[in-house]
Amino acid sequence: MLTSWRFWFVIPTVLALGTVVVFPTGYLLWMSVSHWIVTEPGIYFNGTDNFRTVLSAAEFGSALRVTALYLVLSTVLMVVLALAFALALAAPGSSGLLRAIIVIPLVIPPVVVGFTWRFLLNGEMGFIGAYLLPKVGINVSLLADPTGALFSIVIADVWSRTPFMFLIFLAALQSIPRDFYEAIRLDGARRSQEFLLVTLPMLKGAITAAVLFRVIDALNAFELIYVMTKGGPGRATQTLSLLGWKTAFQNFDFGAAAALGVVMVVITTICANIIFRRFMRTS
């Protein structure tokens, strides 16, 4: 009942959700079906024209491919590295200092990470680009090469975001009862069998959560890529988020940018549902 005192405790949450979720989402949907170009007079309803414009553009297909490649490469590398670090440092006697060192990149803002890696990969004065790479026979500026630029932003992102997965996996590993390992060891199991039969099944929930967070983060990645390459060279590193920024703040087409935002929300939701349902079937 509305007169119940419990109802009043819910009002702040409802207001907060309405302010930060419901209203922005509704406003985005309204913009996506409106003709809103800053350089042209008038804002009016145009139905699905913005979506047709966005989905039929050559830039959209290119950005979608780059986003998918960036997402897959970075996610696979993060899962492998984070799991390896967590397995190595999950033991009770492992060094707390090493854990702290691994976590440090997580607290560095993406803009700072982007500037740092851009300087390191600089072909004229960067430690990696001007010194290490020529030593191994690579004389190409990575940020000026389409393949090298994509690989560079993946490496920078993996360095920055792997600690988050590491913390998730480390907490999950430490929550596994030791009795499970003792029982399987009594049956003569090897280390590889312990990992496949005990560790991996017990980490399914943690891996699913980490990958879900990663998918959402990668589909919305902007600062690091913008600082390092601004989507170049050409369209080699132009993801959907950078395409949305370009549409809104270079082409001044807010309606098309909003439509692209709605498409990105749909893609994110589909990916999240696929991952979650896959986990539910195998758990």
Image (cartoon, grey):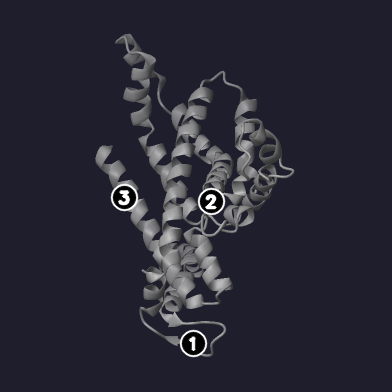
Q: Position of residue 63 (x, y in %)?
A: 45, 59
Residue at image location 38% in from the left, 42% down from the top: 208
Question: Which marked residue is nearer to the observer: mark 1 or mark 2?
Answer: 2
Disc nearer the start of the sequence (3/1): 1
Q: Amino acid at mark 3?
A: Ile
Q: Position of residue 251 (x, y in %)?
A: 55, 75
Question: Which marked residue is nearer to the observer: mark 2 or mark 3?
Answer: 2
Q: Which residue is mark 2?
A: 146
Q: Name above or below for residue 62 compared with residue 218.
A: below
Mark 3: secondary structure: helix
Q: Name above or below for residue 253 compared with residue 186.
A: below
Q: Are marks 3 and 1 in contact (CB under 8 Å)?
A: no
Q: Which residue is mark 1?
A: 43
Mark 1: secondary structure: loop
Viewer-proximal residue among 54 and 30: 54
User: In this rendering, does residue 195 appear at all?
Assistant: yes
CA separation in Å, label 3 and label 1: 37 Å
